[in-house]
Image (cartoon, rainbow, N blue to C red):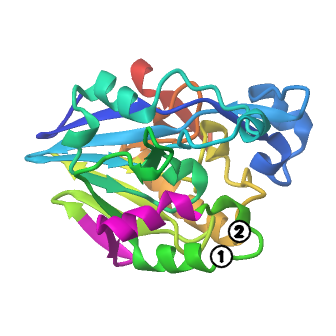
Amino acid sequence: MLFGDYRVEIVPDAEFRLDGGAMFGVVPRALWSQSHPPDEHNRIRMNMNCLFVEAGGERIVVETGIGDKWSAKHEAMYGITRQRPLADSVKAVTGYGAEEITIVVNTHLHFDHAGGNTTRDAAGNVVSTFPNARYFVSRDEYAHAESPHERDRASYLAENWRPLAESGQLELKDADYEVVPGLRMETVAGHSRTMQCARLERGGRTLFGFADLVPMRAHVAPAWIMGYDLYPVETLEAKRRLLPQAARENWLCLFYHDPEAPLCRVVEVEGKLKTIPYEQV
């Protein structure tokens, strides 16, 4: 679709599953299971919805999903269901091959956001998925990934970024920076101290990618916060600041992990925030 003078597309990566209790923190299963019924392992269905922006001569992918470097054991553990590699999905949705992508942006380097940065070649070596792209991540997030918190250490897999540093493709950025005119990355504390959200402003419209601050539509409720968040009180503060603004200003909101309707409007109904899938707006 056109967003001002830029082209924007959503590129789904793969379906996967995580524990529902971890995804909803202190919210009782009796509540969250109504919208996200768990499987026999208490896991809920999720997706990873990457953002493609074509801006002038730049072809940008924000987030790269979970990647395809997993063992059979871990594919089963995370319930990964993949129809095709991310590069093939980018081609199918945008018409551009992996070699034509010029910039890749990661909001943070957790494996379900940066796993598709790299892939394995025919010899089994880990190489860049997008061979001609510059890869952007904040300097603070890179430092955190290299020395992670005990609670999120398992989410960082160095194979998703070190080969890019070695190839010279990785560029470290400030806590807030502009990718191209109108597309900004903003550090928003809560999930971690260093995760970023994407803000695209063109033609008087705003598209905001909430990354793991509001991973799915159900998390629009202020107290519905992931157990994975290192700083849940800060998550709550950020949600109370950003979501009412999204409703007032009619933002288009991207909920990265939503398996059904990742692109929504947020509206306020009788004092509560609700989501309307973009297709229904």
- Residue 205 visible from this viewpoint: no
Q: Residue at x 28, y 51 (%)?
A: 200
Q: Is 161 included in the stretch rendered in magenta?
A: yes
Residue 126 image position (x, y, % from top left): 47, 52
Q: Is 271 included in the stretch rendered in magenta?
A: no
In three-dimensional space, the C-alpha distance between marks 2 and 1, rounded to whole angstroms, equals 5 Å
Q: Which residue is mark 1?
A: 148
* Badge 1 amino acid: Pro
Does 204 appear above or below 84? below
**Looking at the rendering, in which quadrant would you find the C terminus?**
top left
Q: Which mark is residue 198?
A: none
Q: Which mark is residue 153?
A: 2
Quadrant hosting residue 122:
top left
Quadrant hosting residue 176:
bottom left
Relative depth, front residue between 68 and 219: 68
Residue 236 image position (x, y, % from top left): 65, 63
Looking at the image, residue 263 sits to the left or right of residue 70; the answer is left
Does 276 appear above or below 246? above
Span of residues in magenta: 158-178
**Looking at the rendering, in which quadrant would you find the N terminus?**
top left
Relative depth, front residue between 17 and 193: 17
